[in-house]
Image (cartoon, grey):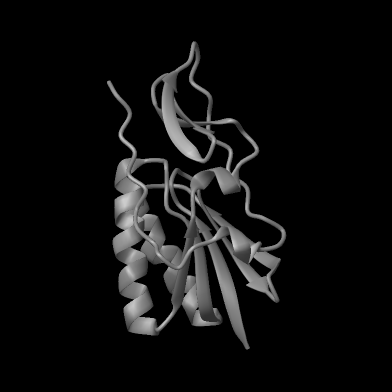
Amino acid sequence: MLLNIVLISVDSPIKLGIYDNNYLTKSFELSGKIGDTLPRIFSEVLKEYEIENIFYANGPGNFSAIKLTHIFLQTLSIVKKINLFCADSFYFTNQRYINAYGKIHFFKKDNEILSTKLDEKIPNIFILPNKIDKNIFSAKCKPLYILPAI
């Protein structure tokens, strides 16, 4: 049976969910550098599951994590013939702000992602959805690089 994955790797820890009929059945969380953790978690998952689609956050978030995730998933998609779908990181959080660095944060207003400086750094809290809403995702996946003004 072919399953789906949801991946949130724009910040540590990486969160990965296994979905059967679009419902979350198992989840993984792994802390560390994206270049180390992404291959490790997928190595384990691909040994145990046959994956049809990967739904993932393409940004905003950690610039290096977004770049490495994009390259890794594009390669995996070609080699394993897995479909990729992406959505911005705000789909995976209930917070209004996503930390960029220091006190600089991203926020979404009228479907535009902007940056602002807050009084305090707000830690990112990302959540795997219980059910995949495929209408939120796009098959035209490119990294969402948003570099806030310094």
* Depicted 11 relative to depicted 68: above or below: above
Does 15 sit left or right of 65 as displayed?
A: right
Q: Position of residue 32 (x, y in %)?
A: 41, 47
At x 30%, y 72%, the residue is 75
Does 46 sit left or right of 18 as displayed?
A: left
In depth, the one of 109 and 127 nearer the eye is 109
At x 59%, y 48%, the residue is 92
- The outermost residue toward the front is 110
* Depicted 100 relative to depicted 14: above or below: above
Q: Quadrant of residue 70?
A: bottom left
Q: Position of residue 43 (x, y in %)?
A: 42, 72
* Depicted 108 relative to depicted 119: above or below: below
Q: Position of residue 135 (x, y in %)?
A: 61, 63
- The outermost residue toward the bottom is 1
At x 52%, y 79%, the residue is 51
Q: Position of residue 125 (x, y in %)?
A: 58, 38
Residue 104 visible in this rendered orientation of the protein: no
Does 47 sit left or right of 148 as displayed?
A: right
At x 45%, y 36%, the residue is 113
Q: Quadrant of residue 60?
A: top left
Residue 7 visible in this rendered orientation of the protein: yes
- The outermost residue toward the top is 119
Q: Which quadrant holds the N terminus? A: bottom right
Q: Which quadrant holds the C terminus? A: top left
Marker count (numbered): 0
